[in-house]
């Protein structure tokens, strides 16, 4: 593990644990311009991440969901202080703190920490993927009737024209579950489900996720099979499918 990854883990875990002060305690909710919720926990966690990065890596750029990016730069930290704020405000423990480091616009390490579950995922390019410090791999499911696919909400699938494709994809499978946000992608990385379908995400939702899934042997792609971060879509209108390699062609045929 590189010193940078070790520090990233330290920062993400500290920020994530700080959110527990508000979890399941009736925290107030504000609505942002896009009608998505934000809380004091989101804001506080991002402030902490920015402060720790400034202390440990002076002068390095940070892109965050709540405060944006003040300076230019494709080499930067990317933070989502609470991925799954809707789960958080509902008292559901499937939310996470995401932190990645990008070089020339591509994530070279990622950390995903679930504070309420105390579960940690991380990866560094060329170093494998880990769940609570144990190596993980995706798991192929040779029998389609035993495969499981996750997705975001049915509303979002419908809104972005992906619901029919998902229904076609999951018809022969054992189950379709809406274990959404980073949790669904980590289920793929750790071999518990075979795919996670996200019809619309932002860069801070996916930057930490991609290296973990790929280092676990999985595939990250857009609905046309291309690179998620290829620059053809704006950072707040990305799409991400995480899957085992053996299911890639079936997914592309479904959409």
Image (cartoon, rainbow, N blue to C red):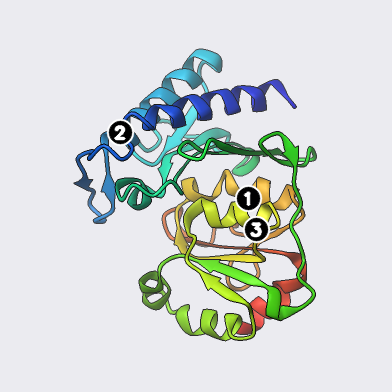
Tag 3 and tag 2, C-beta contact below 8 Å: no
From the top left corner, tell me how far across and down residue 203 is, in percent: 49, 49
Tell me the SS state at disc 2.
Answer: loop
188 lies left or right of 71:
right
Tell me the SS state at disc 3.
Answer: helix
Which residue is painted at 24% across and 56% down in the image? 35
Mark seen at residue 210: 1
Of residues 57 and 184, the one nearer the viewer is 184
Q: Residues within 10 Å of mark 3 (few under 14, many from 20)?
A: many
Which residue does the numbered mark 3 point to in the structure image? 188
From the top left corner, tell me how far across and down residue 16 is, in percent: 45, 32
Q: Residues within 10 Å of mark 2 (few under 14, many from 20)?
A: some
Q: Quadrant of residue 219?
A: bottom right
Of residues 82 and 57, the one nearer the viewer is 82
Which residue is painted at 58% across and 75% down in the image? 175
How much space separates mark 2 and mark 1, taking CA atoms?
28 Å
Is 24 above or below relative to 185?
above
Tell me the SS state at disc 1.
Answer: helix
Is 222 above or below relative to 99?
below
**Front disc: 3 or 2:** 2
How much space separates mark 3 and mark 2, taking CA atoms?
29 Å
Pick whichever of labels 3 and 2 is earlier in the sequence.
2
**Front disc: 2 or 1:** 2
From the top left corner, tell me how far across and down residue 47 is, in percent: 36, 26
Which residue is painted at 60% across and 57% down in the image? 230
Which residue does the numbered mark 2 point to in the structure image? 22
Is 23 above or below relative to 229?
above
């Amino acid at each position: 593990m590189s010193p940078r990854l070790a520090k990233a883990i330290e920062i993400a875990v500290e920020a994530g644990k700080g959110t527990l002060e508000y979890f399941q305690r009736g925290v107030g909710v504000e609505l942002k311009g896009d009608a998505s919720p934000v809380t004091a926990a989101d804001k506080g966690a991002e402030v902490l991440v920015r402060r720790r990065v400034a202390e440990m890596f002076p002068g390095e750029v940070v892109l965050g969901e709540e405060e944006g990016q003040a300076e230019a730069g494709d080499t930067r930290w990317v933070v989502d202080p609470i991925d799954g704020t809707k789960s958080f405000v509902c008292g559901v423990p499937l939310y996470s703190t995401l932190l990645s480091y990008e070089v020339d616009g591509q994530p070279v390490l990622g950390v995903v920490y679930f504070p309420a579950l105390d579960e940690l995922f991380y990866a560094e390019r060329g170093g494998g993927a880990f769940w609570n410090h144990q190596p993980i791999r995706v798991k192929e499911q040779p029998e389609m009737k035993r495969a499981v696919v996750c997705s975001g909400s049915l509303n979002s699938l419908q809104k972005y024209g992906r619901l029919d494709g998902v229904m076609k994809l999951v018809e022969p499978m054992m189950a379709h579950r809406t274990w959404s946000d980073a949790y669904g992608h980590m289920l793929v990385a750790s071999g518990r489900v075979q795919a996670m379908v996200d019809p619309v995400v932002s860069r801070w939702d996916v930057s930490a996720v991609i290296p973990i899934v790929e280092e676990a042997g999985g595939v990250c792609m857009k609905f046309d099979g291309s690179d998620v971060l290829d620059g053809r879509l704006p950072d707040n209108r990305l799409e991400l499918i995480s899957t085992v390699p053996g299911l890639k062609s079936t997914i592309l045929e479904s959409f």
